[in-house]
Amino acid sequence: MKGVVVSSSVLRDIDVGFQTQFNRALGRVPFFYKKLCMRVNSTGSENIYAWMASLPAIGEKTAEIIRTRLQVLGHSVVNKEFTGIVQVPRTAIEDDQIGVFGPIAAMWGQRAGQSPDLELISQLSLGFTTFKSYDGKALFADDHKAYKRPAVWSNKGTKKLSAANFQIAYASLRERRDAGNVPLFTLLDPSKVFLVVCSDDEATADSIVKMAKTAAGADNPNFNKAQVVVLPGLQPASADRPWFLLDCGNEIGPLVFQDRVMFELTANLDLKSDKVFTEDLFEWKARGRFAIAAGMPEFGYGSTGADAA
């Protein structure tokens, strides 16, 4: 049976097919990070975010106009590189079996598209410990401190998700103020307020914000106050069930997606390369650069879910 002669033109045709499958699948991923993160384009190895400690209030003009000197809080976020390599044996091309690798290229594109979500889940899971905000504290902490002010404030809970604890989180966000004691006007757009939960808490979250009536038949005061986002893999190995309430309707959000290089598929198809000569393998590499970072902790609330509701 006549097989395929491996040539540069054959390899180019295969590459076109792989690229098409990869990019098609990459664009079809239902991204979570696009809902939850403020997107920032990056042009270097890192971005430095200059959050303002306090902005002046805008009020009626009087004889004395209050002036506020802006205090800039630096917060550096380094881009990470994400990559993976798929190898195709030369014999698979010679034996005209390349069709089986098309779905693999598509799955590779899907995996690449899911990488920001996996990084988001990983960072949120560290949100009570090593995922730091601009003040040097964990993104969700009970000892945040406004710039040069002695008082501390908390956006952290420890109880499992319940209607009562959702209301506590909601009230906490609603009353947030900046360092100048000016209200931040959170929770103004319910379509951009997200109750983020693990899979085991999906039914509880739905009952809290998706049902017009409570189990007892009364009007549900939490109805439509937030959108439920279920993040598979969010739950740690312990019995804890962390959950988060994020207000993503402001100009600055509680989470940042820093986009440096979009995922792309590149190929090593040189018939004279060492990889081909010694191992008879052609390689395709998926590569992207980005970072998930903490934004403004004022616009988020997180609970470890360690304690009983």
Image (tube, helix red, strand yellow):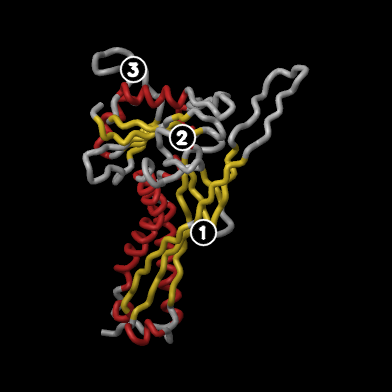
Check disc 3 and report the residue beneath it: 220
* Camera-side mark, 2 or 1: 2
Give residue 191's position: percent from left, percent from top: 45, 30
Who's the residue at 55% across and 48% down the image? 40
Check disc 2 and report the residue beneath it: 144
Structural crowding at the residue carrying mark 3, measured as other residues with C-alpha within 10 Å and reported as few (<14), some (14–19) or many (≥20): some
What's under tag 3, amino acid-wise? Answer: Asn
Q: Distance between the residues labelled 2 and 1?
A: 33 Å
Per the image, label 3 sits on a secondary structure element best described as: loop
Nearest to the observer: residue 170 or residue 134: 134
Say if residue 37 shows up in the picture.
no
What's under tag 1, amino acid-wise? Answer: Val
Do tag 3 and tag 1 residues touch (Cβ < 8 Å)?
Answer: no
User: Which quarter of the image is occupied by the C terminus?
Assistant: top left
Q: How far apart are marks 3 and 2 (CA)?
A: 32 Å
Q: Which of marks 3 and 2 is nearer the N terminus?
A: 2
Residue 250, relative to residue 172: is it above or below?
Answer: below
Say if residue 91 shows up in the picture.
yes
Left or right of 226, for residue 205: left
Q: Earlier in the sequence, mark 3 or mark 1?
A: 3
Check disc 1 and report the residue beneath it: 261
Who's the residue at 25% across and 84% down the image? 1
Give residue 100's position: percent from left, percent from top: 29, 68
Do tag 3 and tag 2 residues touch (Cβ < 8 Å)?
Answer: no
What's under tag 2, amino acid-wise? Answer: His
